[in-house]
Amino acid sequence: MQRLIIFLFLLFVISCQEIEVIQEPINLGAESKVMAVNSAVVKNNALEVTLATTPGAKYALAIYTFGGKEPVRKLGFTADSPISFKKISLDTLKHGMYDLKVINISGEEIKRPINHNNYL
């Protein structure tokens, strides 16, 4: 019993020591001032998207089944120019309708329908 009390006391003393947590700042990129889909075209089993972006801002492209909740393709990037061009392969997706969502670091989003069979 005495050993148990000593063990619990030592455990209490050790657990009360202050732990130094070093936090590095997270780089969220520049504030997105511009976000627009200039074009979204399906060519050769790939979605080619041209976006108006803010250089240094972070964005995410996500493709969802039409009306779906979980993305079937995702791509994150940091814009390096006012116009960004991204290409996403659709070769393993079934032909049909999809939703393209463009999301910036602030959580603002643009949703655009995509027809895997044709241009929109």
Image (cartoon, rainbow, N blue to C red):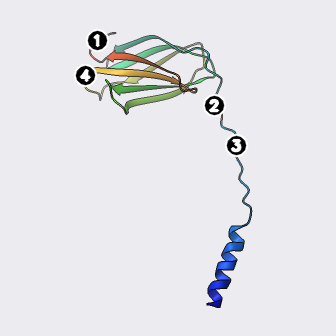
Looking at the rendering, in which quadrant would you find the C terminus?
top left
Residue 3 lies, with reference to residue 12, above or below; the image says: below
Check disc 2 and give the amino acid type: Leu
**Mark toward the start of the polypeptide (2 vs 1):** 2
Q: Residues within 10 Å of mark 2 (few under 14, many from 20)?
A: few
Q: Which residue is mark 3?
A: 24
Q: Residues within 10 Å of mark 1 (few under 14, many from 20)?
A: few
**Mark toward the start of the polypeptide (3 vs 1):** 3
Left or right, 63 with respect to 115, comes to: right
Check disc 3 and give the amino acid type: Glu
Q: CA distance from mark 2 to mark 1?
A: 36 Å
Q: CA distance from mark 2 to mark 4?
A: 35 Å
x then y, percent, for residue 20: 74, 56
Find out whether the residues at labels 3 and 2 contact each other: C-beta distance under 8 Å.
no
Q: Which residue is mark 4?
A: 95
Q: Name the foreground residue: 22 vs 3.
A: 3
Numbered label attached to residue 28:
2
Looking at the rendering, in which quadrant would you find the N terminus?
bottom right
Q: CA distance from mark 3 to mark 4?
A: 44 Å
**Mark toward the start of the polypeptide (2 vs 4):** 2
Numbered label attached to residue 118:
1
Determine whether the residue tagged by mark 2 lies in a helix, strand or loop.
loop
Give the number of the mark in front: 2 or 4: 2
The structure residue drawn at horizontal position 33% and vertical position 24%, both measured from the top left corner, is: 90
Check disc 1 and give the amino acid type: Asn
Check disc 4 and give the amino acid type: His
Left or right, 42 with respect to 1, comes to: left
The structure residue drawn at horizontal position 26% and vertical position 20%, both measured from the top left corner, is: 96
Determine whether the residue tagged by mark 1 lies in a helix, strand or loop.
loop
